[in-house]
Amino acid sequence: MAKTKVKFICQSCGYESAKWMGKCPGCGQWNSMVEEKIKTNKTNRGVFQHSDNIKLSKPTSIMTIETKEEPRINTTINELNRVLGGGIVNGSLVLIGGDPGIGKSTLLLQACARLSETEKKVLYVSGEESVKQTKLRANRLSIATKNLFILAETDLENITKVIHEMNPDFIVIDSIQTIYHNQVTSAPGSVSQVRECTGELMRIAKTNGVPIFIVGHVTKEGSIAGPRLLEHMVDTVLYFEGERHHTFRILRAVKNRFGSTNEMGIFEMKETGLEEVLNPSEIFLEERSQGAAGSAVVASMEGTRPVLVEIQALIAPTSYGNPRRMATGLDHNRVSLLMAVLEKRVGLLLQNQDAYLKVAGGVKLDEPAVDLAVAISIASSFKDLPTRSTDVFFGEVGLTGEIRRVSRVEQRVQEAVKLGFKRIILPKANIGGWTKPAEVEVIGVVNISEALSHALGG
Ligand code: TYD
Ligand code: MG
């Protein structure tokens, strides 16, 4: 017997309660509890048709479980493969989030097209656009393959039927917020809808061994709309980000059960769709104004790939009581810490200065190895002395002003050499143990004042 129950569910964290509350006890958000009707069917909750083939699972000794190297499906888009950890794993559920208009549908349609060219049957379910609209987009992307099927549908039961009939090798659901489960009475996009639909899609992915990509919208606060719990349910969470007014888009993994979360994929949005960026360092350094104070280039590792990025700082006397500290693409606290180190260990009087920091190209850097370049860009702007345009810096800065060792030195150095940099300032502890290319001068430094005297000449 189906019974209708009313619950109040927090739309941001999924906390459930029998009564309404102004503040969610789960996440502390105000005014986020919304009444949702939930029809519960005790014997067969939220599942469409597998009551007659329930198998009892048994525990297995870990020694007898057979494993093979997970075969991966090659999307032929290298930047996407890398972020996924080497390709798509069969039976995985992948969530791809991002602001509206950033290019999620475009990326997935392109991936679908590439896959369908390799004789795979691909189903693209669009709950947002009609079949015609999707076709228009496909024309723009010059997609013409007969194995790509478009379905404009929002009822999950119908989608499930189509999947059973068609048996596709790859499925895209665009987007989870538009799909509804007819056993849940609340509106599409609400926590219970999103949870039930994702649960059902997970079951389809696991039982059929077919990979499913789900598109999810992002709220103003930057998390995937609806519940955080969506992120817990899926195998992989990817974020597609970038400034809408810039053409670069960055794809990064924030959770991945089948690979590392450090990797990033870089794309450029063109008239004819997204194009892979194979030489990110060149692009990020393209617009650098050479010889300007407040700029330093860092060799940062993004996953397994070294990327050279420019860090810019602007230090200016503060006009109000409290100096401002702003950082785009860098951790705000890290910047404050480095300014304190510069103040205490090098004697730069920064306490009455505003500081604005920016990573060029819209990249986010969270590696400790960027510390040295950040500190140098701050000092360079403060003293109004430019760094040499052929210098690269990396190293972690400690609280006593010491420069600490970082990983993967050789790769960072090679990338710098490839781009024609002449001098590399790095932690002294990192000298040795690798072969130094002949074209560059490598300077090992012990502390921040030594690094500054090399970089700014005094
Ligand atoms: P879209 O994939 O619809 O974004 P999302 O699904 O994340 O909401 O991307 C839409 C934007 O991309 C739109 O502003 C137009 C732009 N675009 C191009 O610049 N070139 C193209 O070939 C396509 C298809 C879209
Ligand atoms: Mg879209």
Image (tube, rainbow, N blue to C red):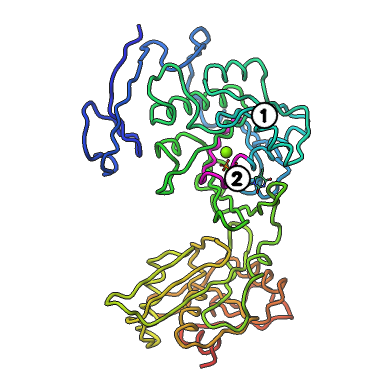
Highlighted range, magenta:
91-105
Task: Depth check: give the residue in front, 168 or 176.
Answer: 176
The amino acid at mark 2 is Gly
Residue tagged 1:
132
x%, y% of residue 162?
A: 62, 17
Does the numbered disc 2 mark a residue whose Cβ is under 8 Å from ligand 1? yes
x%, y% of residue 433?
A: 63, 73
Task: Depth check: give the residue in front, 141 or 41.
Answer: 141
Vertically, is 453 above or below 411? below
Q: Splitting the image into 4 quarters, where does residue 39 fall?
A: top left
Q: Is residue 180 left or right of residue 306?
A: left
The kind of secondary structure element at disc 1 is helix
- Residue 389 part of the magenta segment: no
Q: Is residue 12 left or right of residue 375?
A: left
Whether residue 447 is visible to the viewer of this picture, yes or no, is: no
| Numbered badge on residue 270 | none
x%, y% of residue 418?
A: 72, 71
In space, the residues marked 1 and 2 are separated at their CA atoms by 18 Å
Which badge, 1 or 2, comes first in the chain's sequence?
2
- Select label 1 or label 2 by which is in front: 1
The kind of secondary structure element at disc 2 is loop
x%, y% of residue 410?
A: 65, 69
Vertically, is 39 above or below 285? above
Q: Is residue 329 left or right of residue 159?
A: left
Query: In the image, what residue occupies the spot 44% across and 67% down?
Result: 327
Whether residue 62 is visible to the viewer of this picture, yes or no, is: yes
Query: In the image, what residue occupies the spot 63% across and 24% down?
Result: 151
Vertically, is 282 above or below 214? below
Residue tagged 2:
103
